[in-house]
């Protein structure tokens, strides 16, 4: 071995390979950009086979809690969907550069298991000839989208943080959330959402957005980016060029955004500009059509005018561009699964996320290079960006984590306390006629808790009515819990009305109430009993417009434990309501008129 050469990656715990590259300082010790390391990274790329290069561009799901010994059901699922038994076989066969964790893929049972899985994946990848560490990612937005649950710390989601209005809180949530992910071996988080939710009917973004004001959203996005990345985790702002004004869910359809270019620049672009200015490591594309930015009818994920023309050239972004999941309908409506990855690369993408059939996508890219449609130099450009990110995150120096590290960082009391305090500052008091709130134990000791119990966001205890009841009991109230669901029947409503007769107050959790929702009937019948009724919007704050007769209404923005418990502390007067609406609420009967503007929030 040449004397100027130096081992970058001392393989730990039986990893069978080391990466030896050109002399000079270790990659992880270089400056943040890693630019003056490009020479050594290019040397790594020059040794790769074409097949290895293709693999580096993919980020793939894999079933199982272990890299080498998953449960039989997960082995069966892997064989059916990917043609391999486990993560180790996936890495040996396709040499993928990244793996994404999901709860439904059984990757995220508990923090120690996640750390062990991460180590197993790194060991399996490094055992390959010219093996490289894997960039492990997940969607940990907090709020309603989180893949890692208790006992890890779960923070309020984006719209709740937007209601709190504190960039410091947003940054703290990112820093602590990022530190916990890193301790478990996850180095890329698909957060924060940079979409500006200007459409109350948006079915896929909603409370995942920080709000409706582009400048306020931009400030929160930049704060979260700095928080995550200060913890050594790559943040990913999404979904470029902006998914905030859609009425179609791109998982199931192909949304079209009708903004003019000027509207896009004013409404959608500011948070992405702010993310880039904050040094964002990766940006995720949207499977949406924006005719004003690209009249071809292609989704943004496959649009060269949008990804190269606007994102790279106009906004000056040179970090990693990752697609949203290639299994989503929005990217599959126009082209087959074999064309999508090739067109994404031609558009300017670096990472191809979760194709429905990896063999089809992988072979399509391979054939596109062999047939001359894509050049090997084009692949090298993206691999260099991915390797720069792996170097910056310290993966080329030491990709492993320890169980001790998990115990020192994940879900520790100071983190959980920070989440509780931040959540308290997000709860928003929308209505308080006649000073019904705060509820006093002396006058309203017995409380009936009813309402919607949507499936709990990952890793929270749930269901929401149970969490609310327990939180009231903890504060000295006597709580009775009756789950009435998102569409209560006549019989359920009658049962709730009967239960309300013997209590001092009723707390009802509302969930995405529409004009036709039987949740309205439930609330109005409860109001008719004469009992004081407090309503809590456990997802969209827009619910309040559909229930104008409720005398006390709070917004929690999510039905995770941390937000529900904080809302109860506020309604009981243990914390002051300080949250303010980050989106306007329109009148139900006159949607062009604003009922409560951005910034509305009552105090005690």
Image (tube, grey):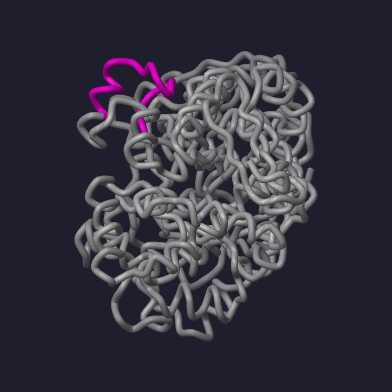
Please name whichever residue, 423 or 240, is drawn nearer the observer in this view of the structure: 240
Residue 137: image location, x then y, percent: 52, 41
Screen quadrant of the N terminus: top right
Residue at left 34%, top 56%? 249
Q: Can residue 437 be seen in this view?
A: no
Residue 26 against residue 442 in the figure, above or below = below
Which stretch did the figure color magenta?
A: 62-78
Q: Seen in the image, is 32 located left or right of residue 186? A: right
Residue 243: image location, x then y, percent: 46, 63
Residue 320: image location, x then y, percent: 54, 59
Q: Does the magenta stretch include residue 68?
A: yes
Please name whichever residue, 198 or 129, is drawn nearer the observer in this view of the structure: 129
Q: Seen in the image, is 305 located left or right of residue 480? A: left
Image quadrant assignment for residue 371: bottom left
Please name whichever residue, 71 or 578, is drawn nearer the observer in this view of the structure: 71
Residue at left 26%, top 64%? 370
Q: Is residue 36 magenta?
A: no
Q: Which residue lies furthest to the front in this view?
A: 2
Screen quadrant of the C terminus: top right
Residue at left 58%, top 64%? 212
Residue 74: image location, x then y, percent: 30, 23
Q: Can residue 59 be seen in this view?
A: yes
């Amino acid at each position: 071995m040449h004397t100027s050469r130096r081992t970058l990656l001392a393989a730990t715990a039986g990893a069978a390979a080391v990466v030896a590259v050109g002399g000079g300082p270790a990659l992880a010790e270089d400056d943040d950009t890693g630019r003056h390391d490009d020479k050594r990274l290019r040397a790594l790329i020059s040794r790769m086979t074409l097949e290895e290069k293709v693999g580096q561009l993919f980020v793939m799901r894999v079933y199982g809690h272990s890299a080498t010994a998953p449960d039989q059901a997960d082995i069966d699922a892997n064989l059916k969907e990917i043609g391999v038994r486990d993560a180790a076989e996936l890495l040996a066969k396709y040499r993928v550069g990244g793996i994404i964790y999901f709860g439904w893929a059984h990757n995220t049972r508990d923090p120690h298991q996640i750390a062990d899985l991460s180590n197993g994946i790194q060991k399996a990848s490094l055992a390959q000839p010219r093996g490289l560490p894997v960039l492990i990612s997940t969607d940990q937005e907090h709020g309603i989208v989180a893949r890692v649950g208790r006992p890890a710390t779960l923070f309020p989601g984006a719209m709740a943080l937007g209601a709190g209005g504190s960039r410091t809180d947003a940054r703290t949530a990112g820093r602590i959330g990022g530190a916990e992910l890193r301790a478990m071996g996850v180095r890329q988080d698909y957060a924060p959402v940079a979409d500006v939710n200007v459409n109350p009917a948006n079915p896929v973004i909603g409370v995942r957005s920080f709000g409706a004001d582009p400048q306020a959203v931009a400030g929160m996005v930049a704060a979260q980016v700095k928080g995550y990345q200060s913890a050594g985790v790559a943040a990913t702002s999404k979904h470029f060029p902006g998914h905030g004004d859609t009425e179609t869910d791109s998982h199931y359809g192909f949304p079209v955004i009708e903004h003019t270019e000027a509207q896009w620049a004013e409404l959608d672009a500011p948070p992405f500009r702010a993310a880039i200015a904050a040094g964002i490591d990766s940006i995720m594309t949207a499977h949406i059509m924006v005719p004003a930015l690209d009249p071809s009818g292609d989704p943004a994920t496959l649009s060269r005018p949008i990804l190269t023309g606007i994102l790279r050239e106009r906004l000056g972004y040179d970090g990693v561009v990752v697609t949203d999941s290639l299994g989503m309908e929005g990217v599959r409506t126009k082209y087959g699964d074999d064309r999508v990855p090739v067109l994404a690369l031609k558009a300017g993408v670096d990472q191809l996320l979760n194709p429905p059939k990896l063999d089809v996508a992988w072979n399509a890219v391979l054939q596109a290079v062999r047939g001359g449609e894509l050049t090997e130099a084009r692949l090298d450009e993206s691999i260099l960006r991915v390797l720069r990110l792996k170097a910056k995150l310290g993966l080329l120096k030491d990709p492993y984590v320890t169980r001790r590290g998990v115990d020192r960082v994940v879900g520790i009391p100071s983190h959980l306390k920070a989440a509780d305090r931040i959540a308290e500052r997000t709860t928003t008091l929308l209505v308080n006629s006649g000073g019904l709130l705060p509820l006093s134990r002396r006058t309203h000791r017995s409380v009936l808790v009813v309402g919607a119990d949507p499936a709990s966001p990952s890793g929270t205890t749930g269901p929401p009515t149970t969490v609310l009841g327990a939180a009231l009991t903890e504060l000295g109230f006597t709580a009775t819990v009756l789950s009435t669901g998102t569409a209560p029947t006549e019989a359920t409503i009658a049962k709730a009305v009967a239960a309300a007769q013997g209590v001092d107050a009723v707390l009802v959790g509302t969930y995405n109430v529409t004009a036709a929702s039987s949740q309205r009937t439930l609330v109005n019948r409860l109001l008719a009993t004469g009992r004081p009724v407090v309503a809590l919007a456990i997802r969209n704050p827009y619910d309040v417009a559909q229930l104008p007769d409720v005398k006390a209404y709070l917004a929690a923005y999510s039905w995770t434990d941390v937000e529900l418990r904080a809302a109860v502390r506020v309604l009981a007067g243990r914390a002051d309501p300080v949250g303010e609406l980050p989106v306007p609420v329109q009148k139900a009967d006159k949607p062009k008129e604003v009922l409560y503007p951005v910034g509305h929030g009552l105090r005690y």
